[in-house]
Amino acid sequence: MIVGIDVSKDKLDVYVLSTKKHDVIKNTKASIKSFFKNKLNKADLELVVFEATGGYERFLHAYMLEEQIPYHRAHPTRVHAFAKSKGFFAKTDRIDAYILARYGKQDEIIPNSTTNQNQLKIQEYSARRTQLKDMITSEKQRLKIIVFDKEMSVCHFRPSGNEFDEIVYHISCFWIKCF
């Protein structure tokens, strides 16, 4: 059974190719778990295909890893080119889920190598560390051009050195667990 899932911020459009069934579920951990447990037989799943959406797919990705379900996290440009080659020009979430399922049926589409939960945590902590560094840099640059109320600016934004250090610590711990 090949399943295509179109991911958006609040919902997932799920299309099962073999049964031609379409469902819409919330993009939450609980909804994803419930759907896979109640509507799909894990043993029958050949491949679950979804696009990398800049983070909205994280709950789904984590569930695939947790349950060891074969998945392919597709590059949106490749899926778009595939859709055009098959004559699909309309774009709805339902059609996108169908296209993802068809895309997954190709012989050259193989499951992604299994990433473990620790690697996902490293990615999340690294992203947060980068956000904090960027915020600190922006604030330092802004402070250089402020004429009045520099004290107010510093009081409103003083990122905790502890949070930054804690994130670096977590990255180190997860990195050690991965290798």
Image (cartoon, rainbow, N blue to C red):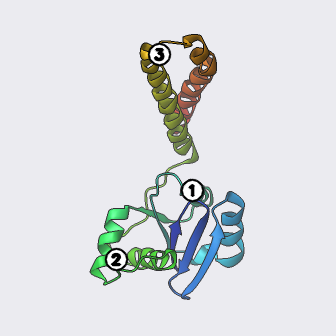
Q: Between residues 155 and 15, which one lies in front from this camera angle? A: 155
Mark 1 vs 2: CB contact within 8 A? no
- Earlier along the polypeptide chain: callout 1 or callout 2? 1
Mark 2 vs 3: CB contact within 8 A? no
> Are there few (<14), some (14-19), or many (20+) residues within 10 Å of tag 2?
many
- The residue at which mark 2 appears reads as 83
The residue sitting at 51% across, 51% down in the picture is 55
The residue sitting at 68% across, 71% down in the picture is 35
Q: Give residue 66's quadrant in the image.
A: bottom right
Q: Is residue 175 above or below residue 148?
A: below
Q: Is residue 73 above or below residue 35?
A: above
Q: Between residues 159 and 147, which one lies in front from this camera angle? A: 147
Amino acid type indicated by mark 3? Ile
Q: Determine the secondary structure under disc 1.
A: helix
- The residue at which mark 1 appears reads as 65
Q: Between residues 133 and 30, which one lies in front from this camera angle? A: 133
> Are there few (<14), some (14-19), or many (20+) residues within 10 Å of tag 1?
some
- Front disc: 2 or 3: 3
Amino acid type indicated by mark 2? Ala
The residue sitting at 56% across, 41% down in the picture is 121
> Are there few (<14), some (14-19), or many (20+) residues within 10 Å of tag 3?
few
Amino acid type indicated by mark 1? Leu
- The residue at which mark 3 appears reads as 146
- Earlier along the polypeptide chain: callout 2 or callout 3? 2
